[in-house]
Image (cartoon, rainbow, N blue to C red):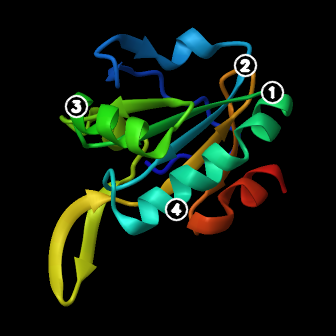
Amino acid sequence: MELQVGDTAPDFEALNQNGETIKLSDFKGKKVILYFYPKDNTPGCTAQACNLRDNYTELQQAGYEVIGVSPDGVKSHQKFIEKQELPFTLIADEDKAVNEKYGVWQEKSMYGRKYMGTVRTTFVIDEEGKIANIIKKVKTKDHTAQILA
């Protein structure tokens, strides 16, 4: 079943870029931007991450924690963070469990070829753990404006 605004955001347990286990419930009482993206160091994903990085202070002032999720591993995330100087957490969802809980692991199509992958989606979660907004048509270069709109 597809998640809707007002639903409780599914809790998860996964490894961050440092190999530490984190849970969504660790952020109870804080607003969370949980953004799903397909792959580290690709043009669209880099543009999106850098837009969030460049506006990170503004997002923090608005009370948000930023967490990125992709199927890449811990080492890939470390390199991505280092190369792009990202100040926020990235989750290594190699088994796609978090992607599946949020319904973003879907069939995609490119050049007529069908394959499974992460559909770029952002969930804005309130302090109570409820989904306040779902952004499906992400503008990678202007994502912060979409979140704060």
Callout 4: helix, strand or loop? helix
How far apart, in angstroms, are the residues tagged by discs 2 and 4? 25 Å
Looking at the image, residue 18 sits to the left or right of residue 58; the answer is left
Q: Is residue 142 above or below residue 77?
A: below
For marks 1 and 2, the one nearer the N-term is: 2
Q: Residues within 10 Å of mark 4 (few under 14, many from 20)?
A: some
For marks 2 and 4, the one nearer the N-term is: 2
How far apart, in angstroms, are the residues tagged by discs 1 and 2? 7 Å
Looking at the image, residue 148 sits to the left or right of residue 133; the answer is right
Numbered badge on residue 47: 4
Numbered badge on residue 1: none
How far apart, in angstroms, are the residues tagged by discs 3 and 4? 20 Å
- Residue positioned 42% across, 37% down in the render: 81
Numbered badge on residue 30: 2
Q: Which residue is mark 1?
A: 63
Contact? badges 1 and 2 (CB < 8 Å): yes
For marks 3 and 2, the one nearer the N-term is: 2
Q: Measured from the top left, where is residue 47 in percent x and y?
A: 52, 62
